[in-house]
Image (tube, rainbow, N blue to C red):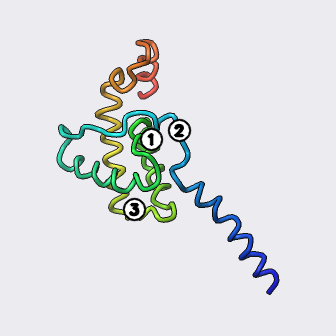
Amino acid sequence: MYKAIRILAAAALSLPLFVAAQSSNVNLPQDKGPDKVDVSKYPAEQQKGYKVFVDKCAKCHTIARPINTTMTAPEWSRYVKRMMHKPNSGISDAQGKTIYEFLAYDQENRKEKNIKAFFPSLSDEEIEKLKASQH
């Protein structure tokens, strides 16, 4: 009985730390970038995906964070799966697939095809290094 009470007390004391770790109170450099993507020229399916992405992902962190992050398609896949397993994410398998497809499309079409626009502060040499590392 005493052991059970100790476990419950420890769980109650650690709950605030757990909640803080899951919240959007953490600020990353990406959070300071743009918090929207103009998807008006994206295919209709990706425009719908953007809406799911914004609705679900904004629950836990800024939308700027993933918008201003670059990852490979396999990295986005792992990231979305990890986010799906966060408590209270509410992201279903179908929604996770939609979010991943949007992020992969955005990565390829907005970030990789126009690196100078995505990274306007990089020098031409840094841009060439980025391009070379993607292939």
Q: Are discs 3 and 1 less than 8 Å apart at CB?
A: no
**Residue at mark 2:** 28
Q: Are discs 3 and 2 less than 8 Å apart at CB?
A: no
The residue nearer to you, when weighing 11 against 130, is 11
Q: Are discs 1 and 2 less than 8 Å apart at CB?
A: yes
Amino acid type, residue under disc 2 in the picture:
Leu
- Secondary structure beneath dot 2 equals loop
- State the separation of the CA atoms marked 3 and 2: 23 Å
Amino acid type, residue under disc 3 in the picture:
Ile
Residue 119, position as x, y percentages in the image: 40, 24
Q: Nearer the viewer, mark 3 or mark 1?
A: 1
- State the separation of the CA atoms marked 1 and 2: 7 Å
- State the separation of the CA atoms marked 3 and 1: 18 Å
Q: Is residue 95 above or below residue 102?
A: below
Q: Quadrant of residue 3?
A: bottom right
Q: Nearer the viewer, mark 3 or mark 2?
A: 2
**Residue at mark 3:** 91
**Residue at mark 1:** 65
- Secondary structure beneath dot 1 equals helix
